């Protein structure tokens, strides 16, 4: 049986038997090296930007709605400056959570939702532990971060089964 030689990068599925021949460095052109890189690392189908946007938008809304009253009580009154700083911290923590979840390429399954909860808890705890809050307030804020990360994960994480994924 003769092997098939492709000049263009092709998607590789798990059912395909693949043998790659690597040319010596002197013979390889930058174009062929780029084609080989795309052939091996073909994960353009994972929506990183959409996940970060959804975590920023929905996570920011959920966290702001649930955390702002608690932050207002904790700071003993409504102060526009402290509310703005709190809102910025909330947006930064949700954006970082979305970025990390997208970077780990989590999917919509139990493992993906569990990891989004762990990442949400860690980021929220680290963000608000630098401020002077009581332990109970910090625990409540972290719990809100976990709930928010899981709820947004239900909306944002892609549902990709293992048999449909490309070999990376």
Image (cartoon, rainbow, N blue to C red):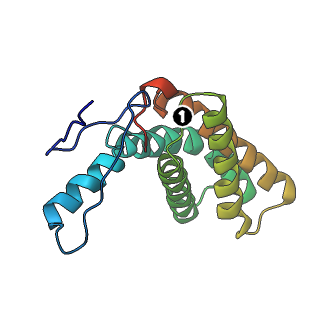
Pick the front one: 145 or 52: 52
Pick the front one: 33 or 165: 33
Tell me where residue 40 appears, x and y as whole percent. Answer: 35, 49
Label 1: which secondary element: helix
Q: Is residue 29 above or below residue 136?
A: below
Task: Say whether residue 161 is visible.
Answer: no
Q: Is residue 84 above or below residue 97?
A: below
Tell me where residue 11 appears, x and y as whole percent. Answer: 29, 36
Residue placed under numbered mark 1 in the picture:
152
Pick the front one: 135 or 114: 114
Task: Say whether residue 2 is visible.
Answer: yes
> Among all residues in the image, which is located at the extreme right?
135
Pick the front one: 37 or 115: 37
> Among all residues in the image, which is located at the extreme front?
1
Res. 86 image quadrant: bottom right
Q: Is residue 2 left or right of residue 81?
A: left
Q: Is residue 125 above or below residue 142?
A: below
Check disc 1: other Cα within 10 Å, few if <14, some if 14-19, many if 20+.
many
Tell me where residue 161 appears, x and y as whole percent. Answer: 50, 24
Q: Is residue 44 left or right of residue 73?
A: left
Res. 146 image quadrant: top right
Tell me where residue 141 appears, x and y as whole percent. Answer: 72, 49
Q: Quadrant where the C terminus lies?
A: top left
Q: Quadrant where the N terminus lies?
A: top left
Q: Is residue 80 left or right of residue 33?
A: right
Name the residue rendered at 43%, 41% in the picture. Answer: 51
> Among all residues in the image, which is located at the extreme bottom?
26
Name the residue rendered at 66%, 45% in the picture. Answer: 145
């Amino acid at each position: 049986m003769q092997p098939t030689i492709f000049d263009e990068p092709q998607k590789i599925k798990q059912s395909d038997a693949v043998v790659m021949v690597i040319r010596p460095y002197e013979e390889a052109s930058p174009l062929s090296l780029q084609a080989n890189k795309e052939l091996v690392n073909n994960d353009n189908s994972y929506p990183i930007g959409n996940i970060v946007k959804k975590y920023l938008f929905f996570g920011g809304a959920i966290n702001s709605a649930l955390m702002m009253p608690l932050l207002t009580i904790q700071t003993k009154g409504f102060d526009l400056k402290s509310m703005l700083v709190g809102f910025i911290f909330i947006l930064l923590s949700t954006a970082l959570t979305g970025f990390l979840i997208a970077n780990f390429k989590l999917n919509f399954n139990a493992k993906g939702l569990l990891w989004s909860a762990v990442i949400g808890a860690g980021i929220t705890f680290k963000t608000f532990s630098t401020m002077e809050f009581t332990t109970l307030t910090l625990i409540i804020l972290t719990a809100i971060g976990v709930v928010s990360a899981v709820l947004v994960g239900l909306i944002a994480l892609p549902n990709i089964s293992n048999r449909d994924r490309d070999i990376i």
